Amino acid sequence: MKTFGRRGLLKRTAAPTAPLLLARRSQADTEAKIEVLVDEGIGTISPDIYGHFTEHIGGVVYDGVWVGEDSAVPNYGGIRKELVDHMKRLKPSVVRWPGGCFADSYNWRDGIGPRGKRPKRANFWMYSDFLRTADAEKQLYEPNHFGTHEFIHFCRLIGAEPYLAANVRSQSPQDFNEWVDYCNAPAGKTSLAETREANGSRDPFNVRFWGVGNESWGCGGGFSPREYAAEFIRFISWVPSFGERLSLIPAGPNGGIPGGSLDWTREFFERLVERDPGMLNRVYGWALHYYCGTAGEAIDFSESDWYTLLTQADGMEDLLLNHWAIMGEYDKHHRVKFVVDEWGAWHRPGSEVDPTHLFGQTSTMRDGLIAGLTLDIFNRHADKVAMANVAQLINNLHSLFLAHEDQFIATPNFHVFEMYSAHYNGESVRTVFDAPEIQTDPDDKQRKLWGLAGSASVHGKELVLTVVNPSVDEARETEIVVHGATILSGSARTLAEDDIHAHNSFEEPEAVTPTDSLLEVRKGKLVHVFPPASVARLRLDLA
Ligand code: AHR
């Protein structure tokens, strides 16, 4: 996995382009220090950064989200009740659907009308190499029982906005326009609005977020960046809005390949601006994908694998900075932000809870730390990241939940998302982390990872600070200093287990859960110990 220099900085700062300014640790008795500069705002942390993604693949939709109205599994109109109840705890803001690669094979018309009459199709993943390694039988055919109405129902149940991905590879701009019409036309005003009403929804769905294709360099059509830019322009020209300000999202680069696919960004923006610089106003966000891969196996990995994967995940930060710099060459005022609409670890098969769950994997503490450090990166770049969607919500890559038939569990990723939801709508502020670096490979002194990293946000008189300690065996006693305010009191929630492989299972659903504690603040001074291999969230009351 490629990294982009900048590794080995002793101090991690929430504003990486600003000069490092702070003094060395003042306390001889603490080995680490976190300094929060509450007056140095970076940007508001959008709850959309904590978004989700559900694709028609393996066990995500069928078995995960959708169990059917007649199922013995408790459900709300066919949607798994336990999933909805857990999602409500996160107050999620946005969910992407129906893909992923599936989106560029999907005909939205297949998923409307009486469920029993909907066509059965070959699923996109039917012939993929990936399926050769899985028990494919149940995944081959798409029954279309979960379509636009069911997805919108799911979003309404959990209080999230829908983000639909349109098919660019195998459909036309006309099909796209008509899906927008079906979703957003006022009641009774178009024939498609009448069809929607006949299908049970008189009121428009008012869908704002629309992806225009997915991974158009690969499964989404194999376009060159310039070809894709031309398709994007064709798709968004004159799309009916019906009064809704559509947020249109072009398919961005594959951050997982060496170099991070910078050419895709350069050539797309070049072509767009060449056509008309005003086109930048039509782009809501640039959809970067980054899977940090794996090291070892999902559950069975060495300490060295642990550090390797955390380091790979940390590559997200340089990826954002590198693409941001290129975007700035064409979009000087940075109108276009990032929509990182797929991210997470991608382990080899073998830990899925059911063989029909293509890409299903069990998330351990390692994945929990990846979730924490990635969300911290997004928070630190709140001025650049408008939305992000972890891949994928349930029974898939970096999932928050695993479910099969009537069994359901939350993974460490869920707990991290719940802890980090305290950042929603806060002002991200510059924070400097100073902790001994970790030498991640005993034979290679050059391979190092930061000792502590995280992010902070201000919410009136409350400061939320999230911190990842990647060391497998060292706790970090840390002095926490807030410049520009005084700490009065505080509490901590910590996700930490003795075993770095710890994970939840149907047999032990609560093996990994966070613990709460009160912080001891003495005369405005706070020293906190971050346990090894942990993710922590501190809430501090300020004066
Ligand atoms: O999330 C699984 C797949 O990974 C998605 O369908 C695709 O967009 C990506 O390559």
Image (cartoon, rainbow, N blue to C red):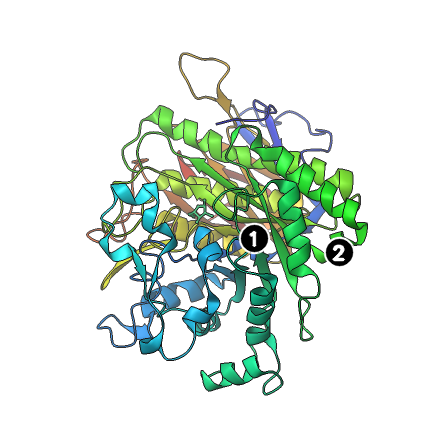
What kind of element bears circle 2? Answer: helix
Q: Ligand 1: does it lie within 8 Å of the C-beta at label 2?
A: no
Query: Dot 2: few (<14), some (14–19), or many (≥20) neighbours within 10 Å?
Result: few
- The mark closer to the camera, 1 or 2, is 2
- Total marks in image: 2
Residue 355 as seen in the image, left or right of residue 161: left
Image position, residue 56 (x, y; %):
38, 58
Mark 1 or mark 2: whose residue is earlier in sequence? 1
Which residue sits at x=43%, y=55%? 102
Q: Is residue 390 above or below residue 87?
A: above
The disc label shown at residue 343, or none: none
Query: Dot 1: few (<14), some (14–19), or many (≥20) neighbours within 10 Å?
Result: many
Residue extending farthest to the left is 507
Amino acid type of the residue that numbered disc 2 sits on in the rendered structure: Asn
Q: Is residue 217 above or below residue 98?
A: above
**Depth check: 314 or 455 in front?**
314
The answer to whether residue 471 is visible is no
In the rendered image, which quarter is residue 471 located in?
A: top left
CA gap between label 1 and label 2 equals: 21 Å
| Residue occupied by mark 2 | 281
Amino acid type of the residue that numbered disc 1 sits on in the rendered structure: Ile
**Depth check: 234 or 198 in front?**
234
| Residue occupied by mark 1 | 49
**Depth check: 80 or 11 in front?**
80
